[in-house]
Image: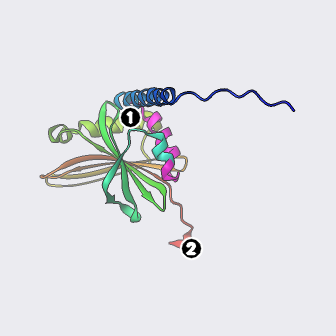
Amino acid sequence: MIEPVRMPMPSVSRRVVGRYIQFIVLSLASCWVSARAQSFSEVFEIYGSLLMAPERALIGTFPQLQRVAKPVAGPGNTRGRWTQRDVFLGGEAFNTTFYIKNGLLQRIELDSTAPDVQCRSLTPWTSAITALEAWNGNESAKGQFAAGDNIQQSVHWSAGDVDVTAYLSVTADACSTKLTFKKRETKDASEL
């Protein structure tokens, strides 16, 4: 009877060093990915493919994710359980929150980290709209509401089965620019 040749197991110290090197390489790669400016096509491809994926797929995709200590309540009984800091889009930094329901990623929100003065000058809003138009042309739908100093705007794009919406809210107290990704929900007329 012929037995296969067995390779000796690496020593414990070699395995530890190997894992340490792997950890360093992955950490540097994740820092590089989050620090560099990404085109909206790259962001859309990654985020669009993760929608409706299991939560563990999200964790495996972004090693720099941070678990939210107290999950944030989101629309449709979703919970914002994970966050990713400093995702650059069109030259602007956004913090991303990933909303989970029934173990699946349901919604992704990017909130601009721009200072209030920059937000009020509409810099992140203009940058986001420019990136979205470069990615998918003109918007599908647009809405605006203005009353005094308060401005609410939204612009919507659809690509495949993913909806992307940009929101701007300017009030006397606060200013925010937000992008959302979610799977398109189509309903039969009998469900309405």
Q: Position of residue 176 (x, y in %)?
A: 24, 47
Q: Position of residue 25 (x, y in %)?
A: 44, 26
Amino acid, disc 1: Ala
Name the quadrant containing residue 75. Answer: bottom left
Q: Residue at x 47, y 46 (%)?
A: 58
How crowded pointer 1 is (Cα within 10 Å; few <14, some 14-19, many 20+) is rated as some
Position of residue 175 relative to residue 135, above or below, is below
Q: Residue at x 31, y 30 (%)?
A: 91
Precedes in sequence: disc 1 or disc 2: 1
Front one among 133 and 103: 103
The stretch drawn in magenta includes residue 147: no
Position of residue 8 relative to residue 94, above or below, is above
189 sits left or right of 17 in the view = right
- In the current view of this chain or complex, which residue is farthest to the left? 172
Front one among 7 and 110: 7
Q: Residue at x 16, y 50 (%)?
A: 174
Res. 190 mark: 2
Q: Position of residue 21 (x, y in %)?
A: 45, 26
Res. 1 mark: none
Amino acid, disc 2: Ser
Secondary element at tag 2: helix
Q: Position of residue 13 (x, y in %)?
A: 48, 27
What residue sits right under mark 1 in the picture? 131
Which segment did they paint magenta? 38-56
The stretch drawn in magenta includes residue 52: yes
Name the quadrant containing residue 63. Answer: top left
Secondary element at tag 1: helix
The quarter of the image holding the N terminus is top right
Position of residue 35 relative to residue 183, above or below, is above
